[in-house]
Amino acid sequence: MLTQTQGSFELLTNETAIALIQKLELLDRDATLTCRKIGDDTLHYVFHVTDNVTNKGVIIKQAVPYAKVLGESWPLTLKRAAIEVDALLTFGSYCPEYIPKVYYVDKQLAITIMEDLSHVKIARTGLIEGESYPLISQHIGEYAAKTLFYTSDYYLEPSTKKEVARAFTNPELCKITESFVFNGPFFEHTPTNYEVELSEIVETLWNDHELKLEVAKLKKIFMSEQEALLHGDLHTGHILASESKTKVIAPEFAFYGPIGFDTGHFIANLLFQAVTREEADQEIILSHIQTFWSTFTGTYSTLWNNESRDEFKNIDGLLSYVLQKAKTDSFGFAGWELIRRASDLSHVIDLDGIANIGQRINVKSNALILGTHLVKNRSTLDIPTVIELVKQVTRSSYSTL
Amino acid sequence: MLTQTQGSFELLTNETAIALIQKLELLDRDATLTCRKIGDDTLHYVFHVTDNVTNKGVIIKQAVPYAKVLGESWPLTLKRAAIEVDALLTFGSYCPEYIPKVYYVDKQLAITIMEDLSHVKIARTGLIEGESYPLISQHIGEYAAKTLFYTSDYYLEPSTKKEVARAFTNPELCKITESFVFNGPFFEHTPTNYEVELSEIVETLWNDHELKLEVAKLKKIFMSEQEALLHGDLHTGHILASESKTKVIAPEFAFYGPIGFDTGHFIANLLFQAVTREEADQEIILSHIQTFWSTFTGTYSTLWNNESRDEFKNIDGLLSYVLQKAKTDSFGFAGWELIRRASDLSHVIDLDGIANIGQRINVKSNALILGTHLVKNRSTLDIPTVIELVKQVTRSSYSTL
C-alpha cells in the first residue's frame, strides 16, 4: 500500500481520477480507463475507474470537507478519511475476508483507493429487492466478534488499547451521532419529519418520559464506554453482499465505544426488513437475526477462551457478563434506531421506500412500537423473545404488547 | 507560570534545586536559601527550598524515570510529570481552593515548582494521630463534585471532552493500577504479603469466586468507562489538611475513568480510619463519610442543575441515575481497596502501623469482612447502611454479617 501526504486539497474529477490511477499504475499502464462517479453520499465522492478492455477496476473514495446532508454549515475536517482508512486497515488485519483491500492512501487529499467491489450489491438494496443473502448474518457475526474482541482490553494489552483508542479519538463524527441520533429526535424534531398519520404515536413517544430517560442512558453509554473499536455506523448501506461474499465498508465513524452500538445497529437494520416483509419472507430475516447473534456470541466466546490475555478471563461468569451487557446495549441501540429512523430526519429507504401510504404508516408504526419495547425492556430480553415480539407486532394488533 | 522544555534529564540535588530557584527568582533574589529533600516516594523526589530569613518557601517535585517501590525493572517515562501538572492546572481551574498553585514547569526535567504547603500535614498522618479535620470531608466532597462534573460530558461539550480525554491518556500509570490493584492480589499474591494469622480469611477471599467476578467487573469499569478526569489515586496520603484548609496533590495517575474510582478511594481511606478507631473516636470518621457523600452529591446536583449543557439534563431521573452509578462504583472500589490494602503487597500505614499484633489482625480482619461486603452488595447499599455495617463489624462478632 502506498501512502501520500503531500499537496493541498482539491476535489477529484473523472479526469483527475483517471490520471491518478495512471500515475500510480494501479491498473495496466497501457489500458484505456473509464471513470464514473458512482457515489455521492453524505460525506464523500466515490469514483469507479475501469480498464475498458479487461473490465478490471478500482474504487477511489474522497472525503469532502463538509457533511452534505447537513448542509455546508456543518463543516468537517478531512481527518475522518484518515480514521476511515486506519479503521479499514485495523479491521482488515483481524478479518481480511470481510474488509476491502486498500491500495493507496493520500491523507492530504482525503483519498483512499480500494479493491473494486462494484459488482457486489449494497446489502440494503438487495434486501429491499428480496435477496436472501444466506451468509450475511454469519459473516457479520464473525466480523463483529473479531473486530470487537481483538480491539478490546480482553485481547490487546490494556496500554496498547489505550494508545489505539487515543488514535481513534473521533470527536467530529461522534458529534454527528450525538446530535442527530441521540438529541435530534427529542430536542430538534419538527412535524415535517414524519407523516401526519404518525403524529399521534410519534408525539406520544416524544413525550414518553421513560423512553427519554432510557435514551439518555444509552447516550451516556455511547459517550463514555470504550469497550472496543467500533465501525460506528454499521447499517446495511455499509455492507456489500452477494450469495457468498460480505464486505463491510465506510468505517469513518470508527471510535472506541460500546460494542452493542455496532451489533445493535446491524440488528436494527435486519428489523427494518423484518417489519416490512410479509410473513413468508420474514422468516429468513428472523433467522438472520438468530444466526447473527449466535455467530457473534459463539465466535466471541471462542476467541475469548483461546486468545484472551486478561488475567480474569477464566473467572466463570465474566464472559457471559460481557456478552449480556452487549446484548442489553444492542437491544437498546437497535430499538432507538427503529424509533428515530421511523420518525425523524434520518429516514431509511427500507421504510420510506414503501409506496403504499397505508402500508408505510403501518410498518412505521410497527417499527415505533417494537423499538420502544426494545429500548425499555432491553435488559430482560433475549433473541427468541425479540423474534416473538416481531411476529406479534407485525401479525396481530398492537394492543397485544 | 513559566514553562521550560529544553535540556536533557538529570536528577536534582539540594544544590541544583537552590540554583534553579535562584535563577528563576521565585524567592527573594538576595535571600540565602536552604533546601531539604522532604519526599522520596514511589515515583518522585520532593525538595523544600526556603528563604532562611523570611522562611518563605517553594516545593520542587521531580519525577524519576522508574517506580522505586516496584524496582527499577518497572521503567516509567517522565510523561507522568506532564500529566500530573496538566491535571493540577485543570483541577485548579475548577477549584483553585483545593489545589496547590503551580509556579514553574520543566517537562524535560520532569520538574514542577509549586506553592509551599509544607506547613500543612498529610491527612493520613494527621488522621492516624487523631486529628479530626472538621472540614476535610466537606472540602473533598466539593473538590470531587467540581472536578468530576466539570470534566464530564455533562458540562464539557462532548467533542472537547474527547480531546481532553485524549490528552490525559495515561497508559503507564493506569497499567500500575491494573496490575497492582486489580490483578496482583488474585494472581500474584504470596503468603509473605500478609500476617500468618490472616491466612485463613485471606485464602478464603482469594478463592471466593463471587468476589473475583465482581472485581473483574470493577476492573472492566476502570479500564473502559470514561466518565470524567479522575485524580486516579485519591487517598489521604495525597491530601494535605489542617483545621481550615484542604489541598489535593499528586494527580499523576490522572486519566478519564469512572467517577466512583476517586470517590471510592476517599471513602476507603476514611474506612481505614473507621476500622482502626475506638467507638468514641470512630464517630467523627463516620460523620466524615456522611458529610463527604452528601456534599459530593449536593454540589454535583447543584452544578448539574445550574451548569449542565447536556440536552437531557432536565429529564427526571437522569441525575439520580448518574449519582446512583457513582455510589455503586464507589462502594465497589472502596471495598476492594479495603481488601487489597489489608492483605496484599501495597499496605497502608493506617492498618500496618498498629503495633499490637492482636489488634492489627482484628482490624485487618474487619477491613477484609467489610470490604467483601461492600464489593458484593455495592448496588444495594447506601451511606447509612454502610455506616451501620462499620459499627456492626467493628463492635460485634463477624457472624452478624
Image (tube, coloured by chain):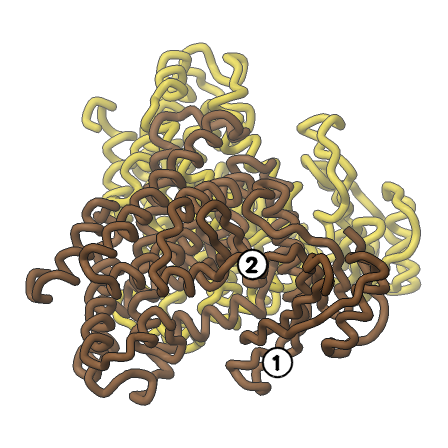
Chain colours: A yellow, B brown
Residue A112 locus on image (x, y percent): 76, 54
Q: Check the image and report above or below for A158 versus A327.
A: below
Please identify, in this view, whether the residue under mark 1 or under mark 2 is nearer the observer: 2
Q: Is residue B294 left or right of residue B167?
A: left
**Residue depicted at 77% across the width and 78% down the height:** B10
User: Residue, x 79% and y 58% (percent of image)?
Assistant: A105
| Quadrant including the C terminus of chain B | bottom left
Instruction: Provide residue A178's location: percent of width, then percent of height.
Output: 55, 36
Residue under label 1, please give it.
B75
Sequence-first disc among 1 and 2: 1
Q: Which residue is mark 2?
A: B119
Q: Residue A148 in the image: state x and y as whole percent.
A: 48, 60
Task: Give whichever of B163, B133 is nearer the camera.
Answer: B133
Can you give x and y, in whole percent of width and height, for residue B322 in the image?
39, 40
Q: Which three-letter amino acid code belongs to the residue tagged 2?
A: His
Residue at figure coordinates x 21%, y 48% from the top left: B380
